[in-house]
Amino acid sequence: MDALPTSWTALAAVVFLLGVKHGFDADHLATIDGLTRVNARSRKAFAPYCGALFSLGHGVVVMAIAVIVSLVAGQWQTPAWLQTSGVWISITFLAALGIANVHAAITAPADEIVAPVGLKARLLGRLGRAGSPGLIAFVGALFALSFDTISQAALFSLTAQQFGGLGHAVMLGALFTAGMLVTDGINGVWISRLIARADELARIASRVMSLAVGGVSLLIAAFALAKLTLPNLDAWSEGKELYFGAAVVLTVLMSYLAGKRLARAPLA
């Protein structure tokens, strides 16, 4: 994206839609799925709001960048180290959440639903477990430390200078965050309901959901790692973020339907 609209109304609408699109990124969806499942299994009351909490933490960084860029307009350059920092943060969390969910599905007693414990506590530690609203928001903030996110925030903040500077940049940051909240917030609520329904149906359904959420996390982590080492793959994936996000949602939905069907199938 090389330029943004010069009309305030159009600029505000585009930034909001950019937030919606950003929230649909596959790494966002997979991480929120994993965090929601971990906290839903621990029966945390805030589990349905993991997506919203993640987006709020993400949005705090976006708004902070918007403020900084407004104050140093014309001198801002996105740090080169952000090219890889966000990718490694995503890979680390996605791999940890994926392993925890897959391990839980494999090792859970045959007569119980899946509850990710044991390895999760050792593997992820307090931050990876993200067992409090503040920690989930912090994970979201860490995910914002990427070149793409900060470059977008810097771009719309610089564009806001023609409308008055700091106040308008903050408003655009808030609109971007609101767009993410729409996508990620709905995803968190949806996943928590699917998980609850799957576990109500049967032990089989809970295993299918755990394997799906864990498998998607691991696949996206592996894909991100592959893009770091294969420039052609990185170039091919450019602009296809919505397709990858849709694939995550569809995979989880299909796993729920499969688990539901298996749970209701008569025993041989």
Image (cartoon, rainbow, N blue to C red):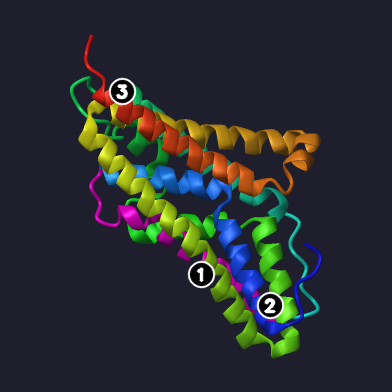
Residue located beneath label 1 in the image: 178
Residue located beneath label 2 in the image: 10
Q: Position of residue 163 (x, y in %)?
A: 71, 88
The quarter of the picture where the C terminus appears is top left
Residue 58 on the magenta span: yes
Q: Identify the secondary structure beneath mark 1.
A: helix
Image quadrant of residue 54?
bottom left
Q: What residue type is labelled 2?
A: Ala
Q: Please name the predominant secondary structure of the magenta segment in the image.
A: helix
At x 22%, y 17%, the residue is 266
Q: Does the rendering let one see residue 110?
A: yes
Image quadrant of residue 65?
bottom right
Which dot marks residue 262? 3
Q: Which amino acid does label 3 sit on?
A: Leu
Give neighbour class at mark 1: few <14, some 14-19, many 20+ (Cα, 10 Å).
many
Give the residues drawn in magenta, as a range: 42-70
Q: Nearer the viewer, mark 1 or mark 2?
A: 2
Q: What residue type is labelled 1?
A: Ala
Q: Identify the secondary structure beneath mark 2.
A: helix
At x 41%, y 42%, the residue is 34
- Taking the view exactly as shown, the residue that stands out farthest to the top is 268
User: Quick check: 261 above or below 17?
Assistant: above
CB-based contact (under 8 Å), mark 2 and mark 3: no
Image quadrant of residue 174?
bottom right
Q: Identify the secondary structure beneath mark 3.
A: helix
Q: Position of residue 18 (x, y in %)?
A: 63, 64
